[in-house]
Every structure is written in C-alpha cells, then in structure tokens.
Image (tube, rainbow, N blue to C red):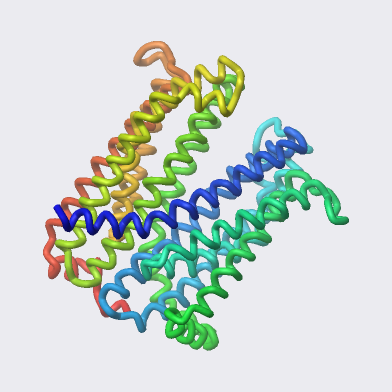
Amino acid sequence: MQKYWVEARKIFILAGPVIMAQISQTSMGFVDTMMAGAVSTTDMAAVAIGTSIWLPAILFGYGLILALTPVVAHLNGSNQREHIAYQACQAYWLAAISSVVIIFILYNSNYIIHFMPHIDPLLANKTIHYLHAMLYGVPGYLFFLVVRNQCEGLANTKPSMVIGLVGLMVKIPVTYIIINGKLGIPAQGGPGCGMATAFVYWVMFISIITWFNYTSSMKDITEATNKYLSKFNPDWKAIWRLVTIGFPIALSFFFEVTLFALVALLISPLGIVQVAGHQIALNFSALIFVLPLSLSIATSIRVSFQLGQGSPINARLVATTAHCIGTTIACVTAILTALYREHIAWLYNHNPQVVAIATHLMLLSAIYQISDSIQIIGSGILRGYRDTRSISIITFTAYWLLGLPCGYILALTPLVGHPLGPAGFWIGFIISLTASAMMMLYRIRHLQGLSAAEILQRGIFTKRHY
C-alpha cells in the first residue's frame, strides 16, 4: 500500500501546477465572454461563434504537439537526455507546419461564416475580424506548447502554471484596453478579444522560452536545441514519427469538440431557454473536467517515464494509482454537483425556467463525471504507452457511433417515447463516456499484459527511433 501512496504523491506534484495552468487557460475564455458581452450582445456572439471555429482548429494543432510529452518523458526515463533537444527541434518544425495550415483555415473563415444560414451581416463581419486577429497568435501558441510539453515531459510542470498565470494577468488589462479603446487605441469591440489573445500567446511563448534558456538545469538542452535549429535542417522522418503519435490524439480532440458543437446546433431550434440551460451545464462540466484532464497529463508523464526505465510493472502501478485518485475525486465532485446544482445554476442565470433545465442537466453531468474521469485518465495512460491510434478509434466509436445517435433518438424523436430535448443528448453523453471508459480499460489491460520484450517488439518503444 505504501508504494501506491508514494506514487499518488508524485502524480499530485505533477498534476497540481497543470490544474492551475488549465484554469488560467479557461479563465481567458471567460474574460473574453464577459468583456465582449459588456460591449454588446453582438460582440459576445461574435466571440462565441469565432471560438467554435478557432477551438477545433487549434486543438488539432495542440494534439499534434502533445506527442512530444511522452517522447521526452520516455527519453528522460531511459537516460537518453541527449536526444531530447533533437526531438524538441522537430516539434518546432511540426508546430510551424501546423501553424501554416491553421492560419490558412482562419484566414478563409469567411467562407465558413457565410455558409451559416440567416447570419446577421454585422455579426458575420465581427466574427471574421475576430478570427483574422486570432491567426497572428497561432505560431506563438504552438511554439509555447513545444516548450511547455518539453518541460512537462521532464516532469517539471511548474513553468506552465506560472506562465499561464502571467498570461492571464496580461490578458485582462490588454483585452480591456483594446476592446474599449483606451490609451489612444481605437475601440475594437469583440474582435479586440482576438487581438489581445494573439498578443498574450506571444508573451507566454517569450516568457517560457526565456525561463528555459536561463535555467541552469536546462542548459545542456538549450545549447543543443540552438545548435540544431541553427542548421535549419528538419528531419522529416522524426517529424513523421511525432505525427504518427500526435495525429490520433488530435483526431480524438476533434471528434470530441465537434460532437459538442453539433449538439449545440441540434438543440438551438428548441428555443433560447433550452439552449441557455444546456450551455450552463456544459460550462460547469468543462470547469470540473480540468481536474481529470490534469491528472491525465500527469499520468501520461509517469507512465512514459516508467516504461523508459524498462519497468512495465511500475507503469501498471502508476495507471492503477491514477485511476483510483481520479475515481475518488470524481465521486466527490459528482456528489457536490448533485447536492448544489441548483445553487450553481442560479450563479449563472436568474430565469427560473433556465435554472430548472440547467439543474436537471447538471444531475446528468454528475452521473457521467466518474466515466469521464476514467476515460480521460485512460487516454493519458495510452499516450504513455504511445498507443494513440486506439484513442482515436475508441473516441470515434464511443462518441459518434454510440453517443450521438442514441442522444439524437432520445432528444428529438419519439422512437423510444416522448422526446426528452437536451436531456436526451446528455443521456447520450453518459452512454458515450461510459463506452469510452470501458474500451479504454480493456485496451489498457491488454497492454499491461505484455512483457517488456513484447512492448519493444510491437514498436511501442524502441531506442532506434532516437
């Protein structure tokens, strides 16, 4: 039992700063919504629509770069520190290529906006300007992720926390100045949120790379990184290996984000009250999700490190400990959500009808928090094994082949009784997350049954890649 407590402590040490970093990131979106809403409803709607386009695109890039974390953790665990800088340099190239693709999509976002039926011309114009402003921050954010994931792979998660807080502290005044036209700057309204965010992403990258370059413990990696980058010679095979790890992760993010976006569109004809109640429950669920997500990142680091040390048994110990922690926390948050859901809903809105719907949906969200915790920590374990292809297959199957059809039937059709409205889709979420959790556990158990020699033979880990 003692070894589980020791491992739990290590996971908490890694996950704590990640939680703060994720909260800082989530708070930036909250700042945009609040400040744009203070200008006008149209400006707030422009930020909301723009975010629904920006988020899938940037999360796809995030998923690709996330491949660096288990690679670095494995190298660190296998005493191959001298190869870390080389892999980080290839991740910079991957970030640069991803930036070009995402910038192209955002630059041509007007085609997506004008494809939406009956959209107000002023709203469309503000949304396009918001996205065009955001594209300037894409390289800064992805380069920031390269350094952050490198640090996290080395089991140093504090920089992401500190830089995240710095970004939030810069974000608040800069957003206020730009959208309201202070200090002689013309008022930009909602699109100003995009300008401020792009600026903050570059501040975050410059801050974390400065920290990395002037930290004595990272001196060897910094010098090697600068040497490789100065040659301006990408290793396309190494980049492709990162893509093969990161692409399934990116796909899983895309499947999840687009699912929730589609559900929002399907609910919209039911009326503003239903949409508002759904949005409140979804927003609160996203806030709670920060906890298991941070544990997932920490678990991925620890599993990769133990496998790098050639210890599948300790990797199994990490996985079991992480799932015990995640399930315990999920039980606590589920109980608190169920008990105080009405009070929480009143914090968001004072319309009794909206609160009633949100309260009901939050009860359903409390049910799926345990499954959600198991499946997201499970994905972290599979990332640790670099078995990322199974993550995308499981996510697609659970969300799009099971959850969405079941949710649609329950919410909008009379096939199994009276249509349930938004609650039907939330029952679909429970089905999809439970199915995902079960499939993740089955895949993890299969991998844990392999010997160290079989893991190497399957190519999950091999030194020749470095």
Is 330 above or below relative to 171? above
Quadrant for residue 363, please give it.
top left
- Specify whether 40 is left or right of 230: right
Residue 402 seen: no
Is 168 above or below relative to 149? above
Is 402 above or below relative to 72? above
- Specify whether 369 is left or right of 149: left
Residue 372 x %, y %: 34, 39
> Could you say which is closer to the camera, residue 300 or residue 405?
300
Residue 84 x %, y %: 38, 78
> Could you say which is closer to the camera, residue 55 or residue 215?
215
> Could you say which is closer to the camera, residue 397 or residue 209?
209
**Residue at the image position 28 percent from the left and 79 percent from the top:** 79
- Specify whether 453 is left or right of 191: left
Residue 165 x %, y %: 56, 57
Quadrant for residue 203, please give it.
bottom right
- Specify whether 270 is left or right of 293: right
Residue 374 x %, y %: 29, 43
Residue 41 seen: yes
**Residue at the image position 50 percent from the left and 24 percent from the top:** 343
Q: Quadrant of the C terminus?
A: bottom left
**Residue at the image position 41 percent from the left and 14 percent from the top:** 414
**Residue at the image position 14 percent from the left and 68 percent from the top:** 452
Q: Report the label total.
A: 0
Farthest residue, direction right: 184
